[in-house]
Amino acid sequence: MIQMNKRYRLEMFKNAIRKMVGTTLTVGLLISNAVPAFAQDAANGKNLFEGNCTSCHGVHEKLIGPALSGVSDRREEAWLLKWINNSQGMIKAGDPIAVKLFNDNGKQSMNSFNFSDAELKDILAYIKEETAKGPATASAAPAGGEVSSMSVANNTQGMDNDQTMMILGVLAVILVLSSILLWRINGVLQKLIWAKFPEKKEEEEPSWYNTKFIPWVRGLNPTIAIMVIVTGFGLAFGGWFFKYANTEIGVQQGYAPTQPINFSHELHAGQMKIDCQYCHSTADVSKQASVPPVSTCMNCHNFFKQDSPEIQKLKTAYETKQPIKWVRIHNLPDHAYFNHSQHVSVGKVECQTCHGPIETMAKVSQHASLQMGWCVNCHRESKVDVENNDYYEQLHADLKERGKRSISVAHNGGLECGKCHY
Amino acid sequence: MENKTKYWKGIEELERTPEFVQLSKNEFAEGLPLDEVLNESDLDLSSNRRDFLKFFGFSVSAVALAACNKAPVKNVIPYVIKPEEVTPGVPNYYASTFGNIPVVVKTREGRPIKLEGNEKSSLTQGGLNAAGQASVLSLYDSHRLPVALKEGKTAKWADVDKEVMAKLESINSKGGQIRLVSGQINSPATRQIIAEFKASYPTAKHVVYEPVNYDGIILANEMSFGKAVVPTYQFGKADVIVSFGADFLGTWLNTVHYTKEYSKNRVPGADSPKMSRHYQFEANMSLTGTNADYRFPLRPSQEGAALMSLYNAIAKASGLTQLPTPAKLEVVGNNIEKAAKDLLAAKGKSLVVSGSNDPYIQSLVNQINSVLGNYGQTIDIDNYYYAKQGDQSWSEFAAEASKVAAVIFYGVNPVYDAANGTALAENIKKMELSVSLAYYSDETASLCQYVAPDNHWLESWDLTEISKGHYGFTQPTISPVFETRQAQATLAIWSKNAAIKNNEFNYYDYIREVAKNTVYAQASGFASFDAWWNQALHDGVYELPMAASNAPANNVLANDLVAKINTKADQPELILYTKVGLNDGKDGNNPWLHEMPDPVSKVCWDNYLAISKYDAAEMKLEQGDVVNVSNGAYTIEKLPVMIQPGQARMTFAIALGFGRSAGVKEAVGKNAFPFVGTSNGTLSYTTTNFKIEKAEGSYELAQTQTHHSIEGRDIVREASLGDYKKNAKAANEDHHGGLRKPDGKMYDLWKEFDYKGHKWGLAVDMNACTGCSACVISCSIENNVPVVGRDEVRRRREMHWIRIDRYYSFQHEGTYATKEDEYNHMDDHQNVRVIHQAMMCQHCDHAPCETVCPVLATTHSNEGLNQMTYNRCIGTKYCANNCPYKVRRFNWFRYNDNDNFNYYFNNDLGKMVINPDVTVRTRGVMEKCSMCVQRIQAGKLSAKLEGRKVQDGDIKTACQQSCPANAIVFGDMNDPESAISKAFAKERAYSVLEEINVQPSVRYMTKIRNVEESIVENAAHH
């Protein structure tokens, strides 16, 4: 444990240094390279692209349709604008490029769209931008990298928030120290001046500092003064420490570690609209929602995106029968019992209520604090569905008798310690 | 109507020794260990303000440092390919068989964590004993043999196979003798494997050896009826049971079956106030003796004479010739005649059993049962039971061991548990080949050249014939944890079985084939073998139709037995008995079994010399003294003395199964097996060849006996069947105790609460409960209760959430002592009565513990549960101080991470048995029975998921589920139809300490004894 922590700390430190260097470099790059000026709005293009095109096209990899990297260089813009909105028509009309494309891509016809020219240009701008960036995954682990190397990478993940705070803190300390130093130098210089030119001292206007502040400080009760200072520092430090300790003991809201495989919920749950329980198949019957076995991924990835380096990792894991060591994001303490099926099947709570807009997260982060206050709050606000579950027959009858329509989880004993702690 | 009987828990309480009085005033056995902590010179207790500031400063920085432990990165590691039947977080259940008890194995994510009895078995009916409960832990025992050994060093299986086979072949071809020594084999498949082994090596012979066996009964039945079997006893059908030293509820034969049946006929209802009458004549106080209506001390050597008297009394009434009358037995008085009268009145519905291993005594018992017409009624010799038996082959082997060239030990450890173990050890060293198929590197295995470790039964396939036509199936619930191989496969490989492929033998296929030929061949109503197999494996048991039970003619003349039965009884006797749980010591490394208090003496972690108060005074021995017990050749040194009420005079008892020296973490207790002798051709567990000498020093036994003294309050209630017939509320009428308002209602500190939904309650029937302690182990497993070890038990820090309080009351000149000082006038504690009372958190509606908790760590749920919230608890122990039942347990140490408590909880392998649904408690918090809240929550959840109400019986607490006596009922008191509501409505139901009006959710049923005299004082009082 201690070993691990030491190593962990070291990694964190290295990471921090790496980040600092990285930040400097980025800033440097930003300054040296003029930001490429695209007339079109690539951001809008990105939205459109992701909303409409990604089910068949990637920028850098071939999916059902060809990879679109550098498409503006290959084709005339006018041709592209026409093609995207009405590819079928062009093929029928016998456009040679169109027919060749159709034949080269397994005679799969492309959907027709109804974009405005401006929108189409935005999309093309986005593709251009992505083309310029190059394949994003190239810097990740080499294709077909060993599974063991993935797991090593896990330990280097901490909470970014922390490191920023640390760097800021160090900077603040340096600032304070240099201020004190400057102030002292100033004072020494002043004294030297006075020593050399005593008349200067006479000329000096008696300052507020000398006439009021210093006598006031001298007149203070030293015990009280020290206590006030200590308390002040204590409060400041305590406040910071409380927040720090919170994260340390497992309150990890916002925790978004890098996973061994760059799995995107945004892509799978958001764009592909795969049902959460297709993968997290036990959420409705078990305590655990469960991370899917590799075989579940391979149900689709036996057919899709085989050459992506990320899928290569998956394939390697599958073939070598080495399980993937995902980093656990939601960590409830051992003394809290949580059961998914109770919430998913009985309470009919949406996944998003606790896990946040998971379908928009390319990298999952912990949405809720998972603190007890958060649990309890929901138990106070949520109603028990007494009408549609015969388990609550008696309760429902009692409520009717008392002229009530519903009861909150809290009023049904949902705030009792022993419901979660045993 | 007051109970006139005085109860006490131990000698100390009776004698009111100053130590006891002192201790009983202290809630906790010791003060805080401050002196130990602060014993350094600069940390003395007289610390001044500066020291305080120093400590304060230190603690603040310590907290800051401790808090710096960054929450480690946790991983989620899913399966690569998930097995279809596994749902993470949901347990799976598989039927299997532990020894002779069909069980259901609960597994979580592929790891067995709990055993329950299998309700599909008509014998054990869902019960499981303490040993069975605990055996799941031996799977995760870090002392297991993980690999094959050659000369004590790790060896490859392939090499071991090659070398052993080569040696076997060369020995066989030279005509050298090969012996395979095993225990009783009840598996037809294993029997076939052994037959094939013998066929491959014609010089091989099979030796059957059981250190604790029932050969006497088997031989007697062979003499009497020509059937060398142990019959099936139907204790439930018997209205009168007379047992001579047979501990049939604790250790004798199929205890789970007997307990199930026995307790059925021990619970009188208001509509049919009827129960069996149980006489017990025995020397050392056994679990069965504690449950008897009449218990009389009887030395083993007097048993023959007593049985003859019994036979004569019965013969006289039946017009048969009487035997030459033995001298009248003083100790038994006219009680034999009394028993005979009852037996005669219940002809055909009675049962006489004896624990003796002497075939002639057993033969006489058969005679008595024959005359009483019990065969075909309460004794079924046609559907016999497969008991543990040795045979003549063992004594032959022991005699010729020096001439044997090769020996293979399978499932036996004779170097430890045979009387001639030392001689055998020497011979093993000289043999050309010695192999052990042991599970641990035990005393025998550590002497063998090769050890080919066997699988745990939870990793094995097997087929067991439990009783005739009653098959139990064993299926693996986990892949072998280590590189072990099932012994049957090992033997098959060494026999060069035809089915071997790549040096692997598929025992599963073999078993299927055997099952097909032996069991399926007799089964009917199945479309195919596969259909039968799948059903049988699913159920875990398959029972062929029972054969008709007949009353066979008895071939033995009672007169012929007279000369052969010893009636000489003038010498002190040493009795060697086995303990509930540990039995013959095969599971000697199981900390759960060691920490389970003996149901009678409440001693854990040791065996001892049980001695009567009378003899102790004679020999000037006191509890805590140590003695040397010697038979000339062997001496047990420094054995602690334990004064046992109920122990017959001139008898001394030592438990077997202790003192293991190899293959265990530590030696616990002392080995008494060398005292086992032979008499009339069978092993004899009594001996007169011994000498007891007081030794230097003293020894404190770890006894839970007086830890939870209730100081003579009205805790247990008792009435005779006669009292009960007159008044179903006998001993249980309003006691008018407690503070009352003018209207007669009791004062109460708390407001009433209207429990709308569920209201959980537990009922314990003291008439059914035998005190067997299976619930204690079951509870420990279910709730992750740590083992604390001998020293901590001595400090009264045992952690069991459920304990079984054992109260003695004693008889003097026909009346039961009522006042404390009466005790001092008695020199005889032979005649005692015992009551067992399971005590756990009573989940009081008006719980005193809840009021005093300063941090609201213990609160009440709207379902009536007293909840303990560990993460809130700061360890003030106020609740324990304020609990009238003394059921709260304080966690003094972090048992799961402390090398001073190096039991299973502290190593990675042992931790596998932890129930993931229950928090592992940390140091400094209070804990107690939660009424298995995790099971309640799970039961409610599955009802909710299925959209239905919770059915009565859906939820079972761990103690209830394992109880072989069906003594515990759990359920919803708000459901008027539930079993618990019906139990609470019984006239016998009462709550302990009802005068303080804490309104417990646990109620007890008054103990009814089937004795003639009245137990409640002044029955006409009301």
Image (cartoon, helix red, strand yellow):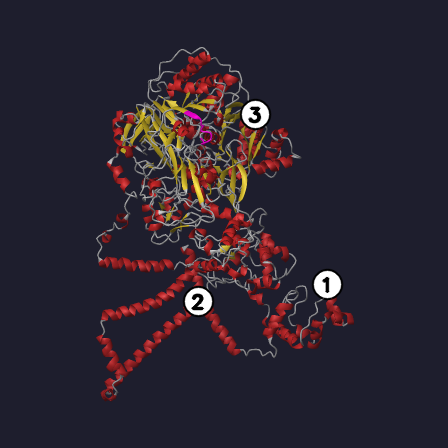
Residue B343 in the image: state x and y as whole percent.
Answer: 44, 20
Q: Are marks 3 and 1 in contact (CB under 8 Å)?
A: no
Q: Are marks 3 and 1 on the same chain?
A: no
Give the letter of the chain under mark 3.
Answer: B
Residue A294 in the image: state x and y as whole percent.
Answer: 58, 54
Residue B644 in view, yes or no: no
Q: To which residue does mark 1 refer?
A: A106
Q: CA distance from mark 3 to mark 1?
A: 73 Å
Three-letter amino acid code at the position of disc 1? Gly
Q: Are marks 2 and 1 on the same chain?
A: yes
Q: To which residue does mark 2 refer?
A: A163
Three-letter amino acid code at the position of disc 3? Pro
B220 or A60, nearer to the observer: B220
Where is residue B707, by image quadrant?
top left
Q: Earlier in the sequence, mark 2 or mark 1?
A: 1
Q: In the drawing, does residue B694 fall left or right of residue B958?
A: left
Work out which residue is located at the far front of the displayed protein and give it: B743
* Circle 2 crowding by C-alpha within 10 Å: few under 14, some 14–19, many from 20: some
B681 or B234, nearer to the observer: B234
Q: Is residue A158 above or below residue B516?
A: below
User: In this picture, which residue range is highlighted in magenta?
Assistant: B268-278
Q: CA distance from mark 3 to mark 2?
A: 77 Å
Q: Residue at x 64, y 36 (%)?
A: B530
**Disc 2 secondary structure class:** helix
* Circle 1 crowding by C-alpha within 10 Å: few under 14, some 14–19, many from 20: few
Where is residue A303, by image quadrant?
bottom right
Q: Are marks 3 and 2 in contact (CB under 8 Å)?
A: no
Magenta stretch mostly in which secondary structure?
loop
A266 or A61, nearer to the observer: A266
Q: Is residue A330 above or below residue B233?
A: below
Three-letter amino acid code at the position of disc 2? Gln
Q: To which residue does mark 3 refer?
A: B202
